[in-house]
Amino acid sequence: MVKSSPLLPASTWLEELQTRIESLRASIDPESVHKLRVSAGRLSVWLELGGRRALRDDLRNLRRAASAVRDLDVISAHEHDSVWAETLRQERAEEAARLRAAMKSPRIEALVDALENVPEPDAVCVRSALQRLKRRVQRAGDQLDDSENRERALHRLRRRVRRLRYALEWLGADTGELRELQESLGSLNDLAVELETLESRGEIQALESRRKAVRHEMDERRLGALDAWRVLRPRIGDM
């Protein structure tokens, strides 16, 4: 039988999702938290390529359930003084308990069962969705010229670049350039998350040196991300 879908089978990432759900029910380790979010994101793009809205909200909610723990893991990867490190540890323990409870929800099993029964996307839907994803990346990048909303635009561009990269990888395409841009934007976003967390603790003066360091590093990485985008922008349509 001729395969109607041009996409790689969803089974690999669905199995990864199931594995990480089971792992997180026992222990909220950083790797499983990260891979849960990645597998949910990739499966969401698989659904989008098939023109399907059903289950995408459920996958988005699953990613969000793990976002607080993931953010704290990223921040904790840096060296911190003992007071800040202990604060982060306590907050992660609280968020980890919430995530473990979420993983035991019957809705999780229902989501996995439903994903197993979604038909493969057809080629016409895939082509249409891919062009739409490219246009969305281009529009997001074009909004970077608005200096007043640049941070928001960079955040939007990062998410859309990630979805386009996943879409192309479902098609078995090389995504090296997109991956590099996504990683550049991702590093900038990680710093933005850390800075937001630091500034919410403005009363802790001992953290001021770290705040200054993060702001400085953000300025440098922002310039690098903007340069990378300008290089890649003309080639988006041909990917």
Image: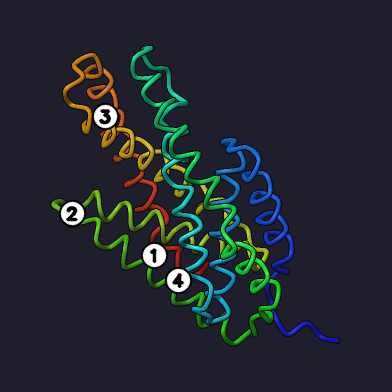
Please tell me how crowded label 3 is: few (under 14), some (14-19), or many (20+) other residues with Cα within 10 Å.
some
Name the residue type under label 3: Leu
Whether residue 171 sits left or right of residue 87 in the image: it is right
Q: Quadrant of the N terminus?
A: bottom right
The foreground one among 207 and 113 is 113
Residue 201 to residue 37: above or below: above
Check residue 149 in the rendering and tell me which mark sits there, or answer none. 2
- Residues under numbered marks 4 and 2 in contact, where contact means CB atoms less than 8 Å apart: no
Amino acid at the residue labelled 1: Val
Q: Nearer the viewer, residue 176 or 116?
A: 116
| Secondary structure under the numbered disc 1 in the rendered image | helix
Which label belongs to residue 158?
Answer: none
Q: Secondary structure at mark 4?
A: helix
**Labels 4 & 1 near each other (Cβ < 8 A):** yes
Q: Mark 3 or mark 1, which is nearer the start of the sequence?
A: 1
**What residue is disc 3 on?**
198
> Tag 4: residue type?
Leu
Q: Residue furthest right?
A: 1
What's the mark number on residue 133? 4
Residue 3: percent from left, percent from top:
78, 82
| Mark before the other along the chain sequence, 3 or 4 | 4
Where residue 132 appears, as percent x and y from the top left, is: 44, 76
Kindly state the secondary structure of the residue where label 2 is placed: helix
Mark 1 → mark 2, Cα distance in angstroms: 16 Å
Residue depicted at 13% across the width and 52% down the height: 148
Q: Earlier in the sequence, mark 1 or mark 2?
A: 1
Alpha carbon of mark 1 to alpha carbon of mark 3: how far? 30 Å
